[in-house]
């Protein structure tokens, strides 16, 4: 089905940082921001995929994204990358905390190290990235921070206790930061994707029976794809959502 999507003039030349922007949902988000005319930077550990994305977008847009290698578990490296974005592109107005690792694990065998590793990827960087961009957004007098949740804990998916805990905690983090940052004109929201048909999901976890379960339980019977998530990111980043903050917005085709 062909869809005509919105353009957001307020995103033109706006400086955006996306974590985990080199592949999957993040890749589509980066591409869409370029389409909107934003100045986009993204961090990732996947060097080959990220460099390939930059080259692909160079051929399509006059504003190709800036790729910075960063392992977001290293908070000092993450802070350094954020300062580098300011130096090269200007003050960040939009932060998209997209990066995550949704590896499955057994609750019975989950180790303390694996639990801590999940928090180090799926929760901790979102707070410290928000903390690091705060002075830049204060200088701008506005900002939008989009934290990524997940429907996994809402649908009692199981098999990913640490990840589910992090994603449930993201809603609390969002609401707390929305109150603290709101006095500076900064909005903070949680975007909760449903079961998006990325290559990672298809390769690792989505088989025929899973696809049937999704079709049976989604209200809308089309497959959810990364563009559906990027569309909401654009809206939450643009001035069109100027009075939306501390909210959880679910894009899941009616799965929850």
Image (tube, rainbow, N blue to C red):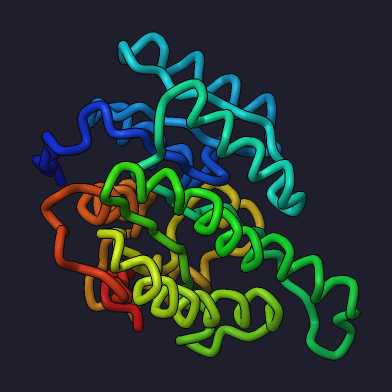
Question: Does residue 162 sit above or below 23 in this rendering?
Answer: below
Q: Which residue is drawn at 55% across and 81% down?
A: 169
Q: Which residue is drawn at 66% across and 44% down?
A: 78
Judge by depth and name the residue closer to the eye, 197 or 181. Answer: 181
- In percent of width and height, residue 239 lies at 15, 49
Picture quadrant of residue 241: bottom left
Q: Residue at x 52, y 66 (%)?
A: 208
Question: Does residue 27 sit above or below 167 in this rendering?
Answer: above
**Picture quarter with the C terminus:** bottom left
Relative placement, left or right, of 237 versus 147 is: left
- In percent of width and height, residue 122 lies at 64, 65
Q: Residue at x 69, y 60 (%)?
A: 121
Judge by depth and name the residue closer to the eye, 44 or 73. Answer: 73
Relative placement, left or right, of 244 versus 167 is: left
Judge by depth and name the residue closer to the eye, 249 or 103. Answer: 249
Picture quadrant of residue 157: bottom right
Relative placement, left or right, of 231 versus 188 is: left
Q: How many labels does the image show?
A: 0
- In percent of width and height, residue 14 lies at 28, 33
- In percent of width and height, residue 197 lies at 45, 55
């Amino acid at each position: 089905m062909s869809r005509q999507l919105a353009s957001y003039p307020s995103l033109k030349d706006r400086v955006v940082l996306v974590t985990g922007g080199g592949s999957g949902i993040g890749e589509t988000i980066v591409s869409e921001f370029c389409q909107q005319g934003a100045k986009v930077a993204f961090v990732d550990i996947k060097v080959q995929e990220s460099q390939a994305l930059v080259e692909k977008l160079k051929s399509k847009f006059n504003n190709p994204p800036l790729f910075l290698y960063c392992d977001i578990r290293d908070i000092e490296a993450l802070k350094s990358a954020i300062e580098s974005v300011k130096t090269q592109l200007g003050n960040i107005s939009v932060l998209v905390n997209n990066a995550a690792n949704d590896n499955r694990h057994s609750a019975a065998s989950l180790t303390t190290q694996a639990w801590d590793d999940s928090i180090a990827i799926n929760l901790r960087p979102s707070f410290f990235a928000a903390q690091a961009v705060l002075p830049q957004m204060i200088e701008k007098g506005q900002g939008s921070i989009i934290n990524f949740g997940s429907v996994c804990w809402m649908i009692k998916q199981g098999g990913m206790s640490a990840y589910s805990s992090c994603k449930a905690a993201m809603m609390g983090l969002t609401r707390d930061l929305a109150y603290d940052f709101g006095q500076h004109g900064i909005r903070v929201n949680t975007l909760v994707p449903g079961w998006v048909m990325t290559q990672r999901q298809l390769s690792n976890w989505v088989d025929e029976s899973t696809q049937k379960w999704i079709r049976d339980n989604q209200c809308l019977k089309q497959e959810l794809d990364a563009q559906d998530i990027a569309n909401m990111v654009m809206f939450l980043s643009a001035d069109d959502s100027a009075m939306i903050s501390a909210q959880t917005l679910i894009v899941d085709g009616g799965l929850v």
